[in-house]
């Protein structure tokens, strides 16, 4: 047996099952906890995950420079247009911080928000980089201080009851007209955590996966405007209103699970429906969401 997790690395043999069983137990702790308990659990769950799964792909990739470049380069292609020497950049869930370190060369300040020090242990950090520990939902940086906020494979790890709070805290951290770019796997081609090898819905640490329509509705409920989905193909990015891809998601939703998952994961649907969403904080309250 072998599998590929949402970071793209392959894990093989009995380790797939071992990773799955550990992650499922940890995920159930979060699913069953109330809001107050989850504030303490996010950090301890991920600390325990990395200790119990030392072969976790995120830990393995940290020691592989080529894998790091493979992961960072396409993200930088997306982000470069939004960066400037005076900008403050915030990444939520920075993993091994390789992307945050790359961005630090182009901006004035970088915040990296994470629940665990384990993944960043023993790293040499740039002078304009600051690691900020969080309870999993809070964004403990000054209000109105961030020009560009970014997360990749993060929001699906939050309990769905915490997702709106998380989006609101990022909104509060943004300067007026600041932008948040959120990348998350599309539910229609999932599950995308390790449970995808065994289950038809996420049972690992992807506590909820989203479609473009579902995530855009969350963005709008918080107050973001100029919400866009960002299809990508061969390093080129478009910018579309989410309603343009919703009919395709609706059509796929009606298909039986095996067919839906296969079609959603294949081109052109993968390029069109991959959930890369951006939203801006209005320069003035009450601006249109379009």
Image: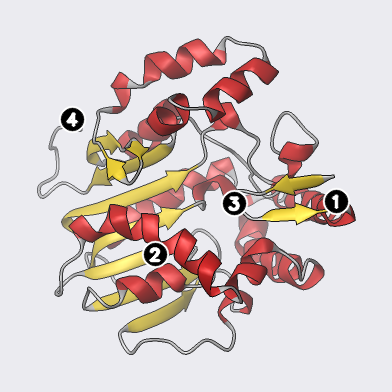
Of the two numbered discs 2 and 4 in the rendering, the one whose residue sits closer to the viewer? 2
**Picture coordinates of residue 44 (x, y %)?**
70, 69
State the CA–CA distance, disc 3 to disc 2: 20 Å
Assign a secondary structure to mark 4: loop
Observer able to see residue 193 = yes
Of the two numbered discs 4 and 1 in the rendering, the one whose residue sits closer to the viewer? 1
Reading the chain from its start, which is encountered first: label 1 or label 2? 1
Q: Nearer the viewer, residue 254 or 132?
A: 254
Residue at coordinates 58% horizontally, 89% vertically from top-left? 122
Assign a secondary structure to mark 1: helix
**Picture coordinates of residue 50 (x, y %)?**
72, 69
Residue named by callout 2: 91
State the CA–CA distance, disc 4 to disc 1: 43 Å
Q: Which of the image's four quarters has the N terminus?
A: top right
Assign a secondary structure to mark 2: strand
Reading the chain from its start, which is encountered first: label 3 or label 2? 3
Local packing at callout 4 (Cα closer than 10 Å; few below 14, some 14-19, many 20+) is few
Rendered view: 39 above or below 281: below
Quadrant housing residue 139: bottom left
**Picture coordinates of residue 232 (x, y %)?**
35, 39
Q: Image check: 17 left or right of 222?
A: right
Residue named by callout 1: 21
Q: Do the residues labelled 3 and 4 touch (CB within 8 Å)?
A: no
Reading the chain from its start, which is encountered first: label 3 or label 4? 3
Residue 290: image tag? 4
Rendered view: 220 above or below 143: above
Residue named by callout 3: 8
Assign a secondary structure to mark 3: loop
């Amino acid at each position: 047996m072998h599998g590929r997790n949402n970071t793209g690395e392959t894990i093989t043999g009995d380790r797939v099952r071992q990773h799955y069983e550990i992650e499922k137990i940890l995920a159930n702790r979060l699913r069953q906890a109330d809001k107050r308990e989850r504030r303490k659990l996010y950090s301890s769950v991920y600390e325990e995950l990395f200790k119990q799964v030392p072969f976790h792909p995120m830990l393995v990739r940290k020691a592989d420079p080529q894998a790091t470049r493979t992961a960072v380069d396409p993200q930088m292609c997306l982000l470069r247009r939004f960066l400037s020497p005076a900008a403050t950049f915030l990444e939520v869930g920075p993993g091994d911080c390789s992307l945050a370190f790359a961005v630090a060369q182009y901006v004035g300040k970088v915040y990296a928000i994470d629940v665990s020090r384990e993944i960043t242990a023993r790293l040499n950090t740039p002078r304009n980089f600051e690691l900020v520990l969080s309870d999993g939902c809070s964004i403990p940086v000054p209000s109105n201080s961030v020009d560009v906020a970014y997360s990749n494979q993060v929001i699906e790890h939050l309990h769905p009851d915490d997702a709106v709070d998380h989006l609101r805290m990022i909104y509060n951290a943004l300067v007026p007209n600041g932008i948040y770019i959120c990348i998350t796997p599309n539910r229609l081609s999932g599950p995308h955590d390790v449970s995808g090898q065994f289950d038809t819905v996420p049972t690992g640490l992807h506590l909820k996966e989203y479609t473009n329509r579902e995530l855009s509705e969350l963005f709008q409920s918080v107050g973001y405007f100029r919400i866009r989905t960002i299809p990508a193909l061969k390093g080129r990015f478009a910018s579309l209103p989410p309603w343009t891809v919703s009919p395709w998601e609706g059509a796929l939703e009606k298909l039986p699970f095996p067919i839906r998952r296969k079609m959603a994961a294949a081109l052109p649907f993968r390029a069109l429906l991959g959930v890369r969403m951006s939203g801006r904080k209005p320069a003035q309250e009450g601006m249109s969401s379009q």
